[in-house]
Image: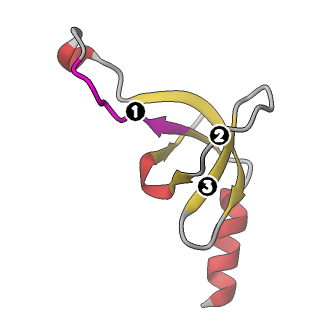
Amino acid sequence: MYQKRMIQAYDKKEDLVLQKIIHIQKDFRGKYMPNWEGLYVVKKVFSRGALILTEMDGKNLPNPVNLNSIKKYFT
């Protein structure tokens, strides 16, 4: 079971992902507002489901992101 989790964590590294936008305020665009943002690279995966993402140019995002708020990007 441990080996299976380690393989899954290793496979997630260097993947391209999109991050879900959390809407705090209502926007005038309504339902046409985008739900996903950016194209990020997974830099580090923690065991409890947190990820550290970097932008395509190498800048790290300031806070870790929950695994549930990302979606894998397929090219």
Report x, y in % for residue 31: 19, 19
Q: For the point 61% across and 73% down, which residue is it? A: 47
Examine the image and state in which quarter residue 73 appears: top right
- The image quarter containing residue 33 is top left
The residue type indicated by label 2 comes to Pro
| Mark 1–mark 3 distance (CA, rounded to whole Å) | 16 Å
Magenta segment:
18-26
Measured in 3D between alpha carbons, the distance from the residue under mark 2 to the one under mark 1, in whole angstroms, is 15 Å
Q: Residue at x 64, y 36 (%)?
A: 40
Question: Disc 3 designates what residue?
Answer: 51
In the image shown, does 5 or 62 lie closer to the viewer? 62
The mark closer to the camera, 2 or 1, is: 2
Q: Residue 43, percent across and down?
A: 74, 50
* Residue at the (40%, 32%) spot, across then down: 21
Instruction: List the residue tagged with mark 2.
Output: 62
Q: Amino acid at mark 1?
A: Ile
| First reached walking from the N terminus: tag 3 or tag 2 | 3
- Which residue is identified by label 1? 21
Q: Report x, y in % for residue 50.
A: 57, 60
Secondary structure mostly seen in magenta is loop
Whole-percent x, y for residue 10 in the image: 73, 66
Q: Is disc 3 in contact with disc 2, using a CB cutoff of under 8 Å?
A: no
- Above or below, 5 relative to 32: below
Spatial CA distance of label 3 from label 2 is: 11 Å
- Which secondary structure lies at badge 2? loop
